[in-house]
Image (cartoon, rainbow, N blue to C red):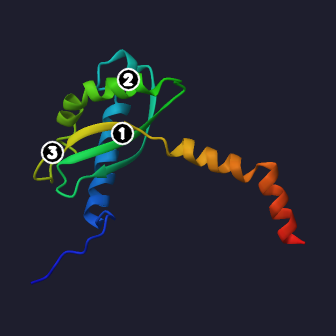
């Protein structure tokens, strides 16, 4: 009896479907199909969509650009998630089940900035200069 590997890495299928869902959500938002003042007034970047192993849940990581309080935009997207899910149908018609869409704030850019700030700090620069000599 074959056993499944116990890895937490997403499968190729999960990655492929996640990218298709990301492209479809992006098109829905770009066309302005969602009638919500907050969403219409905000430029939204979708950096990644992670699919559950059964492909029934899509978690979209978004970054609202030019907005200080991301939670307002994330809340508006989650309020309109069922409508957005319905608009994905024509682009994802090959899927057996249309995934439930959830929106989360993408904090990866904040993490990158923290790492960059650490690498540019005087202490790290000093240590790097000593290694080169």
> In the rendered structure, which disc, 3 or 2, sits on the residue that comes first in sequence?
2
Residue furthest right as drawn: 133
For mark 2, does the 10 Å Cα neighbourhood hold few (<14), some (14 to 19), or many (20 or more) residues?
A: many
Q: Which mark is residue 39?
A: 2
Q: CA distance from mark 3 to mark 2?
A: 22 Å
Occupied quadrant, residue 14: bottom left
> In the rendered structure, which disc, 3 or 1, sits on the residue that comes first in sequence?
1
> In the rendered structure, which disc, 2 or 1, sits on the residue that comes first in sequence?
1
Residue at which label 1 appears: 26
* SS state under label 2: helix
56 left or right of 30?
Answer: left
Q: Which mark is residue 98?
A: 3
Locate residue 116, reporting x and y percent.
67, 49
For mark 1, does the 10 Å Cα neighbourhood hold few (<14), some (14 to 19), or many (20 or more) residues?
A: some
The residue nearer to you, when weighing 106 against 132, is 132
The residue nearer to you, when weighing 61 against 42, is 61
């Amino acid at each position: 009896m074959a056993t499944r590997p116990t890895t937490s890495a997403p499968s190729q299928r999960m990655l492929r479907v996640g990218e298709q869902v990301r492209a479809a959500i992006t098109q829905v938002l770009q066309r302005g199909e969602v009638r919500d003042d907050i969403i219409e007034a905000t430029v939204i970047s979708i950096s990644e969509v992670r699919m559950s192993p059964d492909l029934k849940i899509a978690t979209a990581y978004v970054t609202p650009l030019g907005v200080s309080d991301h939670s307002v935009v994330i809340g508006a997207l989650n309020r309109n998630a069922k409508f957005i899910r319905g608009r994905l149908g024509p682009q994802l018609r090959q899927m057996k089940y249309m995934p439930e869409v959830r929106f989360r704030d993408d904090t990866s850019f904040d993490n990158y900035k923290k790492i960059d700030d650490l690498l540019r700090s005087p202490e790290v620069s000093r240590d790097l200069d000593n290694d080169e000599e």
